[in-house]
Image (cartoon, rainbow, N blue to C red):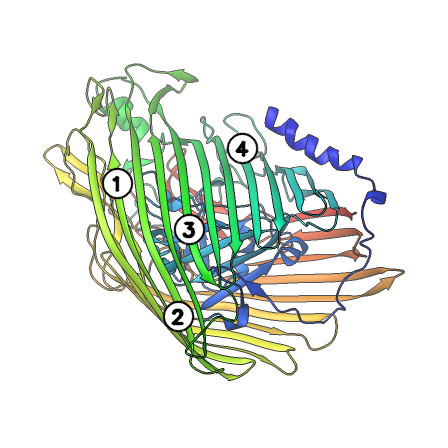
């Protein structure tokens, strides 16, 4: 409760900052239709977007706000080759260029400014810890596609998502506030409040910037068993504070605090027909909803998800180079309940029946609830020295960067499982079912370097290299009684160590100052680690690393006085020793572990076209075609040669349109729309006879529109999301619902909202 009071106080505190205290900001800025040069920093140096020799997307904070794209699931459609697996709110597996087989470790790194904010190890389901940062008061989001291991280490095997916040303004006081609300078709209406203030002080040598968000998450799924409507309702908040100090021109220090949280009564799963009784022969209507949106569970999937980070960035500019130190400490806590009662162990046999009736313990059907807790504590230190603009070698331009990186990541995965009385769902039955606790430590030390030599004004060559050492430890405890024996058992500590070198080479040639072609070869790597021991498998084999080799060819161009631009890339990725989730047989049955099996190959083309035919009008078309397949039989994964990789749409495409015109007085009017298409994709692989292997999800499309007026100081906006009320499905399990039904996650129904803003 105290946190929400703090967030509300920050927002209300904006009211004491009167317009008279701030410089007049009614100027609407550049004329409509003017083209702005986009600068990105994800390569750890400032470069024009059109000059970066790899697939890069930059989304401005202004554009994200205009289309109400406040989270990952909103802006994923604006990035070619990007998809998202989100089994429940707070769990985010980011997929770039199709690198996904459902394994526990992340293939895409997430970074906030200079702070790594994703899990490097796989011990606590790190694949689902991609940071989902609220986009309010962001400067931009940068997405780099393809391996970025030379600059960002093991987690960036498939790419990088970087959130760039607005730095404090040393020169001008600023403030803004946004108030609004939205309503979901057939569901709730919720409120939204966002605010920011920026205060320079110490003679413009320091400034403090604080932003805060609090909003409701509308529910639209009902639970008749509990008599609750809008069962998947919730709330979220975000607070970011940053202090920038620049006592002299050569030195800057920035201290940042970030806190974000999400609370949900239940996840977004709704019951569908499913195929629980005969998963090998699913019915044609297996995806059909039962009723409208309902999930009649007795046990809510409550979710509490929190991100917190403290960061200090120091930079000193010498005559030839700049020395930067980035230090941070972050925490991630994810607590949620899983109702396993109706999940099938075998066709027609759910866990609630098997554990309650088939085993001679409770002698009655029971509820089975997993209370999972995942904790991450991550310390990072990076020190790098990089050349200042204009550096030369042998009278030719020479950009260079060298650095050292260290991270210490401590994780705890707790999975206690309760037996519940169906007549009294809050009652925990005895003896206990059991569970486990997995504390682990991941340490990574890396040295890296990146060089770009400009042979001529038109041709240069970039090369990067990184050497990485990882050391991991894990100590597992299993809890009594039914699942793992009559007593708690603590297993001996397991240790693994790895060394890996990754590299990249990228020649680029400017045919004209505004047209560039490039090629890129890069390697990626994802660390292995210890496996979970159990009483039936006390010494499991370790998980090995997997590797990628990325071949990319692209062209970027601005034509017709910069009114038409395009960025097209083709890629081919070889993925070897692929990390998987699997089962191994023991003398007492099968045990789930992490393993390596098979190879995969991902090929595709990505495109992004932008056209500004007249002043005020902007049109765009972006998307990707990806052919991502297993290329070697992997029976331990439940996959065979030629099978498509999961949660990778074959085709994605988005058409954007935006028009701005003078309306009245000092106000401009705007109309912005985005239509997105998501092609067919498959669910995760499975080797269980109770789960339909690799179900194909149908394609769907989404329409977003916003319109309003804005004079640079005051704004009024109306917006609609999923205006056609598409029933697109993003997740599916053929079992898990009551009475042998399935569960599916649908995109949020039609949502209409309004927002009123003011800047001072």
**Quarter holding residue 597:** bottom left
Front position among marks 2 and 1: 1
Q: Mark 2 and mark 3 in contact? Answer it, CB < 8 Å.
A: no
Counting residues from the start of the chain, the first of labels 2 and 3 encountered is 3
Between the C-alphas of marks 2 and 4, the distance is 38 Å
Q: Which residue lies under the disc numbered 4? A: 263
Give the crowd class for mark 2: few <14, some 14-19, many >=20 residues within 10 Å.
many
Q: Which residue lies under the disc numbered 2? A: 604
442 left or right of 1 in image: left
Q: Position of residue 480 (x, y in %)?
A: 24, 20
Q: Which residue lies under the disc numbered 3? A: 383
Counting residues from the start of the chain, the first of labels 2 and 4 encountered is 4
User: From the viewer's perspective, is residue 201 above or below residue 596?
Assistant: above
Element class at badge 4: strand
Q: Mark 2 and mark 1 in contact? Answer it, CB < 8 Å.
A: no
Q: Please give the label number shown on residue 472.
A: 1
């Amino acid at each position: 409760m105290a946190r929400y009071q703090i967030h509300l106080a920050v927002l209300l505190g904006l009211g004491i900052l009167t317009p008279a205290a701030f410089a007049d900001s009614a100027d609407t800025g550049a004329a409509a239709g003017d083209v702005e040069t986009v600068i990105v920093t994800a390569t750890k140096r400032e470069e024009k977007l059109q000059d970066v020799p790899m697939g890069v997307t930059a989304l401005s904070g202004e554009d994200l706000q205009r289309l109400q794209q406040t989270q990952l699931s909103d802006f994923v459609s604006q990035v070619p080759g990007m998809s998202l697996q989100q089994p429940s709110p707070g769990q985010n597996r980011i997929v770039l260029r199709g690198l996904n087989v459902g394994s526990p470790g992340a293939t895409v790194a997430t970074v906030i400014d200079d702070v790594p904010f994703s899990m490097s190890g796989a011990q606590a389901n790190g694949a689902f810890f991609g940071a989902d940062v609220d986009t309010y008061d962001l400067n931009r989001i940068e997405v780099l596609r393809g391996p970025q291991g030379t600059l960002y280490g093991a987690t960036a095997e498939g790419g990088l998502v970087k959130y760039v916040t607005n730095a404090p303004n040393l020169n001008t006081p600023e403030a803004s506030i946004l108030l609004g609300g939205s309503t979901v078709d057939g569901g709730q209406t919720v409120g939204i409040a966002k605010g920011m203030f920026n205060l320079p002080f110490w003679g413009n040598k320091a400034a403090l910037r604080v932003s805060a968000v609090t909003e409701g998450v509308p529910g639209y799924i009902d639970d008749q068993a509990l008599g609750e409507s809008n069962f998947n309702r919730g709330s979220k908040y975000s607070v970011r504070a940053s202090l920038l100090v620049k006592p002299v021109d050569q030195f800057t220090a920035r201290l940042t605090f970030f806190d974000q949280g999400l609370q949900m009564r239940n996840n977004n799963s709704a019951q569908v027909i499913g195929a629980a009784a005969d998963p090998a022969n699913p019915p044609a209507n297996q995806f059909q909803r039962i009723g409208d949106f309902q999930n009649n569970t007795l046990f809510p999937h409550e979710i509490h998800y929190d991100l917190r980070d403290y960061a200090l960035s120091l930079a000193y500019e010498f005559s030839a180079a700049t020395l930067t130190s980035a230090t941070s400490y972050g925490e991630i806590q994810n607590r949620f309940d899983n109702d396993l009662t109706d999940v099938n162990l075998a066709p027609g046999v759910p866990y609630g029946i098997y554990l309650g009736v088939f085993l001679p313990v409770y002698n009655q059907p029971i509820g089975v609830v997993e209370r999972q807790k995942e904790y991450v504590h991550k310390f990072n230190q990076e020190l790098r020295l990089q050349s200042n603009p204009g550096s030369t070698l042998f009278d030719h331009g020479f950009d260079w960067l060298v650095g050292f990186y260290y991270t210490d990541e401590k994780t705890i995965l707790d999975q206690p499982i309760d037996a519940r009385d169906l007549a009294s769902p809050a009652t925990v039955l005895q003896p206990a079912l059991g569970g486990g606790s997995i504390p682990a430590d991941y340490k990574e030390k890396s040295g890296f370097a990146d060089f770009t030599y400009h042979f001529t004004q038109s041709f240069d060559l970039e090369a990067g290299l990184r050497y990485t050492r990882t050391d991991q430890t894990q100590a597992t405890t299993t809890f009594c009684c039914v699942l793992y024996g009559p007593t708690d058992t603590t297993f001996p500590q397991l240790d693994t160590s790895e060394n890996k070198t990754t590299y990249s080479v990228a020649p680029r040639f400017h045919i004209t100052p505004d047209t560039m072609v490039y090629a890129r070869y890069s390697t990626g790597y994802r660390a292995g680690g210890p496996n979970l021991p159990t009483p039936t498998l006390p010494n499991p084999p370790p998980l090995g690393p997997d590797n990628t080799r990325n071949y990319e060819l692209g062209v970027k161009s601005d034509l017709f006085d910069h009114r038409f631009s395009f960025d097209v890339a083709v890629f081919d990725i070889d993925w070897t020793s692929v990390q998987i989730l699997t089962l191994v047989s023991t003398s007492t049955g099968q045990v789930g572990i992490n393993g390596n099996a098979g190879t995969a190959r991902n090929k595709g083309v990505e495109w992004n076209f932008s056209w500004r035919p007249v002043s005020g009008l902007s049109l765009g078309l972006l998307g990707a075609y990806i052919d991502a397949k297993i290329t070697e039989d992997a029976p331990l994964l439940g996959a065979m040669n030629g099978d498509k990789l999961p949660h990778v749409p074959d085709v994605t495409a988005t058409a954007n349109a935006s028009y701005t015109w003078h309306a009245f007085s000092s106000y401009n009017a705007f109309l912005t729309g985005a239509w997105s298409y998501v092609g067919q994709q498959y669910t995760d692989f499975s080797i269980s006879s109770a789960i339909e292997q690799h179900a194909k999800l149908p394609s769907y499309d989404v329409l977003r529109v916003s319109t309003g007026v804005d004079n640079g100081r005051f704004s009024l906006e109306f917006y609609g999301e999923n205006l056609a009320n598409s029933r697109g499905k993003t997740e599916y399990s053929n079992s898990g619902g009551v009475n042998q039904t399935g569960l599916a996650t649908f995109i949020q129904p039609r949502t209409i909202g309004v927002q009123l803003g003011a800047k001072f």
